Amino acid sequence: MPAAPRSGLRVLVIVPAWNEEASVGATVREIAETNPDADILVIDDGSGDRTAAVAEEAGALVARLPFNLGVGGAMRAGYRFALRRGYDVAVQIDADGQHDPRYLGRLIERLDDADVVIGARFATEDDPYKVRGPRRWAMVLLARVLSRLAHTRLTDVTSGFRVSNRRAISLFARHYPAEYLGDTVESLVIGARAGCVITQEAVVMRPRMAGRASHSPVKAAIYLLRAVFALGLALVRDWPAQLDEAGAAPSPAFPDPHPSPTPSPAPESHTKEVER
């Protein structure tokens, strides 16, 4: 069984969620049960259902975005919250239950030698997760390019299950992409170019708790084309070349269009107090 996170670290688990009322409650409760010392922040990304209410009832802090910004916009808000509150570790976990929070201890341990650790599929020969056709081709292409950029073997650069230390939190709070695949692929490009050490740890992904993913041949082909376009865009963009002495990339000259929201507290009986 995966190890528990080390004590003494302030850990924030960020859960971006859009219309996930059927699964977000169980996800929050499982994170709390397996990682009782971590704080949980659900970013309600403009949901039209009861995602925010269900997350609060389960014991999470909730930040409501006024409209849907996508995973990238939601995660940037989460990283800003983590930076301002002084967390040592920020964790990204999907709201649909695919990411097993029991792996958090193992991923966080790898931060001793890295700034970003990806919870990766395909890292072992016996990994049960199978992807075929154009979707798999896209994943292989992305992994090979990012592996060269990060100077290490990466097998699953589209995984949304990852942990970041304070150095990476500071970077991503200022420079985090919101475009398609930006929250996964482009964020790794930004991190690698800024000098972050990126590595991975093998994990087993689970099926979604609710709904089902659609991987028809047509959608798989579209995924391939969009992935190639997203990678090309990420590589030609002028992202920060390095981190400054404080561990943060220089801030852009233009104002931030998406200020970090203030999370609404969950009921006192369910939510631990977060230091201000």
Image: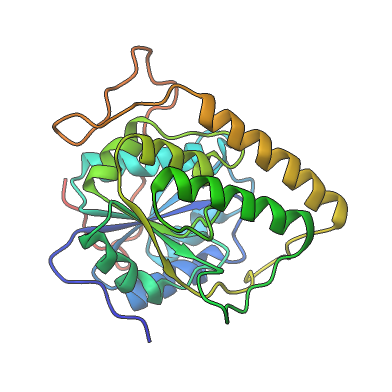
Q: Is residue 255 visible?
A: yes
Q: In which quarter of the image is residue 171?
A: top left
**How many dots with numbers?**
0
Q: Relative to 29, does residue 88 appear above or below in the rendering?
A: above
Image location (x, y in percent) of residue 212: 73, 65
Image location (x, y in percent) of residue 234: 53, 32
User: What colouring style does the render use?
Assistant: rainbow
Q: In which quarter of the image is residue 259?
A: top left
Image location (x, y in percent) of residue 146: 49, 46
Which residue is depicted at the point 53% across and 25% down?
A: 236
Is 239 or 5 nearer to us in this picture? 239
Is 207 or 40 nearer to us in this picture? 207
Q: Is residue 261 visible?
A: no
Q: Is residue 30 left or right of residue 104?
A: right
Quadrant including the C terminus? top left
Q: Is residue 187 left or right of residue 142?
A: left
Image location (x, y in percent) of residue 184: 51, 47
Q: Relative to 1, does residue 20 appear above or below in the rendering?
A: above
Is 74 or 219 nearer to us in this picture? 219
